[in-house]
Image: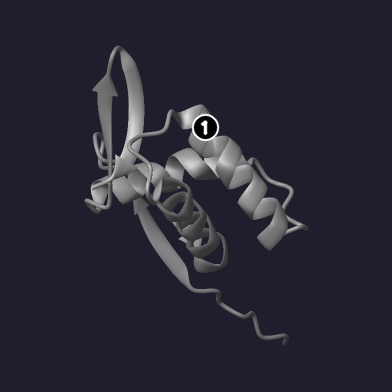
């Protein structure tokens, strides 16, 4: 019998619903780093701006990644909000994200 290699998983939690998912650490860690890199030094970015930055970063770091980068970005950003690392706020009617 062939052994299956178990990859390390990270629990991702939604801040409002508390819904949990398990993501491979090989996906979670680069996305977390990309989100933090994009928001570092920023006073606030819309989700579109954040997502555009993350797409550029992930395409460089993980050229073979062919899943939905915006979907992973929002899921992991929400988890970072749950963990108290990122916050969402409203400024002049715009919903923005920044590091806490």
Type of colouring: one colour
Q: Residue at x 63, y 44 (%)?
A: 55
Q: Is residue 41 visible?
A: yes
Which one is in front, 12 or 38?
Answer: 38
Give the farthest residue toward the top: 93
Give the answer, above or below, for where 29 lies relative to 87: below
Image location of residue 79, percent across then percent down? 34, 48
Q: How many marks?
A: 1
Q: Residue at x 42, y 54 (%)?
A: 36
Question: Which image quarter is the N terminus in?
Answer: bottom right
Give the answer, above or below, for where 96 lies relative to 24: above
Q: Quadrant of residue 22?
A: bottom left
* Residue carrying label 1: 49
Which one is in front, 19 or 25?
Answer: 25
Image location of residue 26, percent across then percent down? 56, 67
Q: Residue at x 35, y 42 (%)?
A: 78
Image location of residue 46, percent across then percent down? 43, 28
Give the answer, above or below, for where 15 lies relative to 95: below
The residue carrying pointer 1 sits among few (fewer than 14), some (14 to 19) or many (20 or more) residues within 10 Å by Cα, namely some
Question: Circle 1 sits in a helix, a strand or a loop, which is it?
Answer: helix
Q: Residue at x 71, y 52 (%)?
A: 59
Q: Is residue 19 visible?
A: no
20 to the left or right of 51: left
Give the answer, above or below, for where 35 lies relative to 52: below
């Amino acid at each position: 019998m062939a052994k299956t290699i178990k990859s390390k998983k990270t629990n991702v939690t939604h801040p409002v619903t508390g819904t949990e998912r398990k993501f491979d650490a090989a996906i979670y860690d680069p996305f977390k780093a990309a989100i933090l890199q994009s928001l570092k030094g920023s006073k606030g970015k819309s989700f579109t701006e954040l997502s555009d930055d993350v797409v550029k970063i992930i395409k460089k770091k993980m050229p073979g990644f062919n899943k939905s980068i915006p979907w992973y970005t929002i899921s992991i950003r929400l988890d970072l909000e749950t963990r108290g690392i990122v916050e969402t706020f409203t400024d002049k009617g715009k919903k923005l994200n920044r590091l806490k």
